[in-house]
Image (cartoon, rainbow, N blue to C red):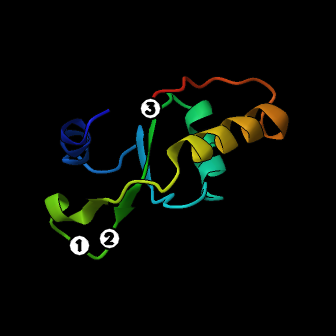
Amino acid sequence: MDEKTIKEILLKGERVTLECKKAKSEMPRSIWQTYSAFANTIGGMILLGVDENMQEKDIQKRYQIIGVDEPRKIVTDFWNTLNSDKVNENILVDRI
């Protein structure tokens, strides 16, 4: 997904089907709450490498795309944990 597409998605802000996670250098622990919520509802998208300033009222300034230091490592860690001990059945699709 390119930066332009991410910016377009962020114009609507976080919602029931979108969650942003900073994840600059590691997978945040809160990812599992999000995964569980999506698994128990209609699903959604998790954007890693996006920082949210909750104090900012202007939605166009609230989110900053910061990227992640080692994207492959973070994705691998996520899938390894997911497939080893977090859930009974994997319901996600890997899209980088």
Task: State the separation of the CA atoms marked 1 and 2.
Answer: 6 Å
Instruction: Tell me if label 1 and label 2 are in contact, CB under 8 Å.
Output: yes
Count neighbours of disc 3 (C-alpha within 10 A) and say few if under 14, some if 14 to 19, many if 20 or more.
Answer: few
Q: Residue at x 55, y 36 (%)?
A: 38
- The residues bearing labels 3 and 1 have C-alpha atoms spaced at a distance of 28 Å
Instruction: Please tell me which residue is depicted at 79% across the width and 40% down the height of the picture.
Output: 86
Q: Are marks 3 and 1 in contact (CB under 8 Å)?
A: no
| Residue behind mark 3 | 96
Report the mark closest to the observer, 2 or 3.
3
Is 58 located above or below residue 20 in the figure?
below
What kind of residue is marked 3?
Answer: Ile
In the rendered view, tell whether residue 95 sits above or below residue 46: above
Mark 2 or 3, nearer chain start: 2
**Mark 1, residue position:** 56
Image position, residue 87 (x, y; %): 78, 34
| Mark 2–mark 3 distance (CA, rounded to whole Å) | 24 Å
Check contact, mark 2 vs mark 3: CB within 8 A.
Answer: no
List x then y, in percent, for residue 74: 59, 47
Q: Residues within 10 Å of mark 1 (few under 14, many from 20)?
A: few
Neighbourhood count class around disc 2 (C-alpha, 10 Å): few under 14, some 14–19, many 20 upward: few
State which quadrant residue 91 falls in.
top right
> In the drawing, what numbered circle is on residue 53?
2
Local secondary structure at mark 1: loop
Q: For numbered disc 2, what is the local secondary structure?
A: loop
Amino acid on which disc 1 is placed: Glu
What is the three-letter code of the residue carrying label 2?
Answer: Asn
User: Residue 76, image x and y in percent?
Assistant: 65, 38
